[in-house]
Amino acid sequence: MTYEFLVASSIGVLVAGGIYLSMRARTFQVVLGLTLFSYAVNLFLFASGRLALNRPPIWDKAVTEYTDPLPQALVLTAIVITFGMTAFVVILALRSFLETGSDHVDGDNVPCDGDDGEAGRGE
Amino acid sequence: MTLTDHLPILPIVIPALAAPVTLMLMRRHPAWGISAAFASCLAMLVAALALLGFAGDGIVHVYEVGEWPAPFGIVLVADRLSAIMLTLAATLALIALLHAVVTGADRKGWHFHPLFQFQLMGLNGAFLTGDLFNLFVFFEVLLIASYGLLLHGQGPARLKAGVQYVVVNLVGSSLFLIALGLLYSLTGTLNMADMGVRVAGIAAEDQGLLRIAALLLAGVFAIKAAIVPLHLWLPRTYDVATPAVAALFAIMTKVGVYSLIRVVPQVFGEGAGAAAWAPAPFLMPAAMVTAAVGFVGVFVARSFSEQAAYAVIGSTGTLLIAVAGWQEATLGAALYYLVHSTLAGAALFLVSDVIARRRGGSTDNTSSGPDFADRQLVGLLFMAAAIAASGLPPLSGFIGKLLILKSVSALPDWGWAFGVILVTTLIGVIGFARAGSAVFWRAAPQTGESPVPPAPRADMAAAAIALALLATLSAGAGVASAYAGAAAGQVLDRAAAARAVLGEAAP
């Protein structure tokens, strides 16, 4: 299995899981989906500077071949932003649940069904 | 370097400095904090007007942050289009701030003023930057501030709408990053001008990826601009936001439109291979449906703020019909209408607040209720705002729509554009007239609840100023549309922009 295949397939699996969870009705699952999706995006950004093994991103006397440092800086920015946003959306979802008594994304008080997992069993 | 050389960065620096200042002052000395917020907005307006004058000479002013040369460092690009948008943002900010302070909306929660300043910093940055990743960063700045502003005042309805708004925009940001990653791996640059030069030399086997990147990027901007079918987040969000905030948000959809106007001709213009004008075939039909959905929404809306939200969608659609022509004449008409529709949308939100403050229990819904104070005066204000938003003479909406109709008549599918714009205008007029006549002409019998005490009329000032500016835009239509036309020409001349950013070495 090559390095490229590993990176590509992990991005693909993360995106698939992220999109599936983002389209769920409950905020917690949506938050998880967004987190998975942002992991995939970070990996993808990182790979956009080409995948290179054992090469330094900064200047080094001994080597002539470098890896692109810019995508790493971009990923750092993206990670900081998504981390802050995830924290914010978790708090927002919690506040919304506490104030409206519903954790559905569309805000409706829909009774839980079996597909909604743990939350459904309490009733 | 003199101060004038640093002019392009001032609209970003001023709010960035003012935000922490207001944060500290609002705790102990609210009056000083409010003065600082006003001073910041005024300074921004002065800087924007100065840039408007400087950019008027037709030269693209480039500011290299930290003096790093162009493709490596981040550049700020101040041309006519940026100057128009900056002036519009600063004007709108002053109006929204005035309304918030007069009605006391800024004291309904903590941190209104710092968030407001950060929102302006994000807006101004997005209008100035010449770097695609920097555009993403400023989008995030304005979005994060807008989340806070949207939730200002709290309440379950805002929290519900807030969750949806945040989730939609987080997905949008992720898609933006994917598009950026694709573009960077293909071109090796993030500078828009440099990217525009380099897309021409992309290998044949990578053309598909380039096209995907172009369409993804256009999709992200379409989410921001609330183009059908990506508009569903807007009505609920703007309906529940504090009206002064919603008035400022009237420019948020225009950020999406601005980004389309900036990025598509510069990066995906002529000679970009498979990505050349890639979003164009989708934009025209989407714009027409957006206009239709928006003005039908105006017709069926249950409250004045919801009506204003749909009017914002409809005006974005009308605007994009002209943008989708991608010619100098159509873009020029679009830019004139952009300025008008932003102010008109803001005026509608402010008037909806003026109505709601006087009607008490029946708030701002569009069904008739008990008599309320200043009915005639408020009715006149609403009529003026409705005239502006639907595009009737004598306000600038009429001139804007006329310019758009005139410019699209040169396009091959002008028939559809004409039909959509004229019919949606009619629907909008009927919608506004129906709501206005129900509320202002038909008084339901008094239902026993005590009438709302008459509020001081000062809260009409902000809406009146917005409408007066529209009248000015109408009176000065010759000057304004000439400037807008020149801005459109400058946007489409990407060789000149590349020369200005990359130096004379650029092809």
Image (tube, coloured by chain):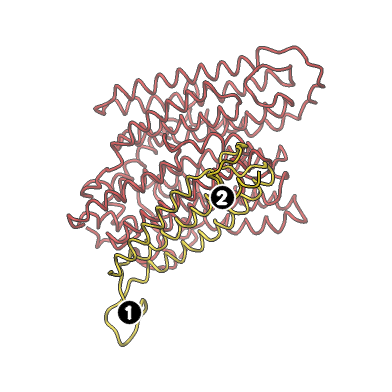
Chain colours: A yellow, B red
Circle 2 residue: B119
Location of residue A70 (image quadrant): bottom left
Locate the N terminus of chain B and report the quarter of the image it occupies: bottom left
Q: Left of A59 or right of it: where is B138? A: right
Q: Left of A84 or right of it: where is A122? A: right
Locate the C terminus of chain B and report the quarter of the image it occupies: bottom left
The percent coordinates of residue A46 (x first, y second) are: 37, 65
Q: In the rendered view, would you say B494 is above or below B458?
A: below
Q: Nearer the viewer, residue A117 or B271?
A: A117
Specify few, some or many for label 1: CA neighbours under 10 Å numbering under 14, 14-19, or 20 or more.
few
User: Rounded to the nearest whole Å, what is the CA distance between mark 2 and mark 1?
Assistant: 42 Å
| Amino acid type at image mark 2 | Gln
List the single residue furthest toward the bottom: A62
Q: Residue at x 28, y 69 (%)?
A: A1
Circle 1 residue: A54
Q: Nearer the viewer, residue B252 or B223?
A: B223
- The chain identifier of the residue carrying mark 1 reads A
Specify few, some or many for label 2: CA neighbours under 10 Å numbering under 14, 14-19, or 20 or more.
many
Label 1: which secondary element: loop
| Amino acid type at image mark 1 | Asn
Q: Nearer the viewer, mark 2 or mark 1?
A: 1
The percent coordinates of residue B387 (x first, y second) are: 52, 22
Location of residue B105 (image quadrant): top right
Q: Nearer the viewer, residue B199 or B13?
A: B199
Q: Residue at x 76, y 30 (%)?
A: B456
Q: In the rendered view, would you say A90 is above or below A66?
A: above
Q: Nearer the viewer, residue B28 or B47?
A: B28
Mark 2–mark 1 CB contact (< 8 Å): no
